[in-house]
Amino acid sequence: MDGPNDSVVSEFVLLGLSGSYETKVFLTLIFSWIYLGIILGNLFILLLVIFNSHLHSPMYFLLANLSFVDMGVASTTVPKMITDLLNEYKIISFQGCMVQICFIHIMGGVEMVLLIAMAFDRYTAICKPLYYLNIMNPKICVSFVITGWVIGVTHAMSQFAFIINLPFCGPNKVDSFYCDFPRIIKLACTDGAKFEFIVAANSGFMSMGTFFLLILSYIFILVTVWKRSSGDLSKAFVTLSAHITVVVLFFTPCMFLYVWPFPRSSIDKYLFIADFALTPVLNPIIYTLRNKEIKVAIKRLIKRHYVKFC
């Protein structure tokens, strides 16, 4: 059994989220509204940045790309989770499972790079304001996005190349609402120790490394502001609070699953609801409520359409 075509298993059974029928109906309604909010909220920010010339700056260029990635991250798992909640048999094909895994890790890799780019953007704006436009020029911004996609694809394929050739000949029940490397490796009819190490070394190192890099960058920004403003950090905290919130929500599940991989409990599937549903729906809210320029752009848009309507 050297490849997927030789595997006996042609589909996986997702055990999904547990609970009574009433609980599942409630969750179906909640996640349907959340997914609608993810799509509408992030699409609104994406279009607002594209069509509002006042938002054609490095920060909002990166924010628009983050919104696009958030829609992709949510769409890989949430619609399937919603449809499966009320289904007795939650089936996903072998090929569908592999595709889902790839997209999750590609989008995850891109989002990590974008968060680093946004942290660098804030560092430049706060610590080197006179050189901001020279450093964060359009070429650098586009390079960040391209680098994100290259790293995301490389990150996903480097693990996928090993997993796709594993033999799956026995159990096919995945204790989660989505497919991912740790859960799938457990089902392979082979010793998965070396593959567990590959996932831990790749995804674990990437998650932990990015998280600490971001935290260090925020600490460095705050120390710089503290020295320059004689201890007044209020403005810097306001600026960075949105980024810190997103980083904590995004990386906590990743580090729980990949830094200490292959947990015996199923708690990770509940934690990853934060990555696939909560973070994507909160991003538009956080950046809209905490950002004056976005608020002004929205008011300008409403005023323009109100005048046209009248």
Image (cartoon, rainbow, N blue to C red):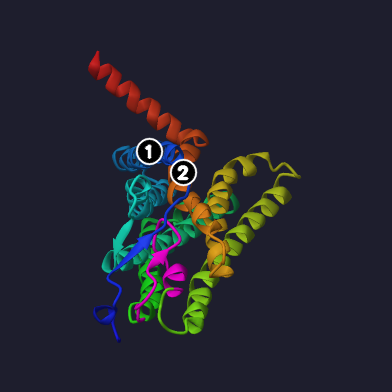
Query: Which three-letter amino acid code belongs to the residue tagged 1?
Result: Gly
Question: Quick check: can you spot residue 299?
Answer: yes
Q: Is residue 98 above or below residue 60?
A: below
User: Farthest residue in the right direction?
Assistant: 230
Whether residue 266 sits left or right of residue 26 in the image: it is: right
Secondary structure of residue under mark 1: helix
Write down the residue under mark 1.
41
Whether residue 268 sits left or right of residue 109 in the image: it is: right
Q: Nearest the camera: 295 or 14?
A: 14
Q: Quadrant of residue 309?
A: top left
Provide residue 117's location: percent of width, then percent of height.
47, 58
- Is-magenta flag for residue 256? no
Q: Looking at the rendering, in which quadrant would you find the C terminus? A: top left
Residue for point 54% across, 72% down? 205
Magenta span: helix, strand or loop, mainly? loop
Secondary structure of residue under mark 2: helix
Q: Which residues are magenta?
A: 166-186
Residue for point 46% across, 43% down? 283
Provide residue 304's location: percent of width, then percent of height.
30, 23
Provide residue 185's location: percent of width, then percent of height.
44, 74
Provide residue 302's location: percent of width, then percent of height.
34, 24
Write down the residue under mark 2.
283
Query: Which three-letter amino acid code belongs to the residue tagged 2?
Result: Asn
Q: Are marks 1 and 2 in contact (CB under 8 Å)?
A: yes
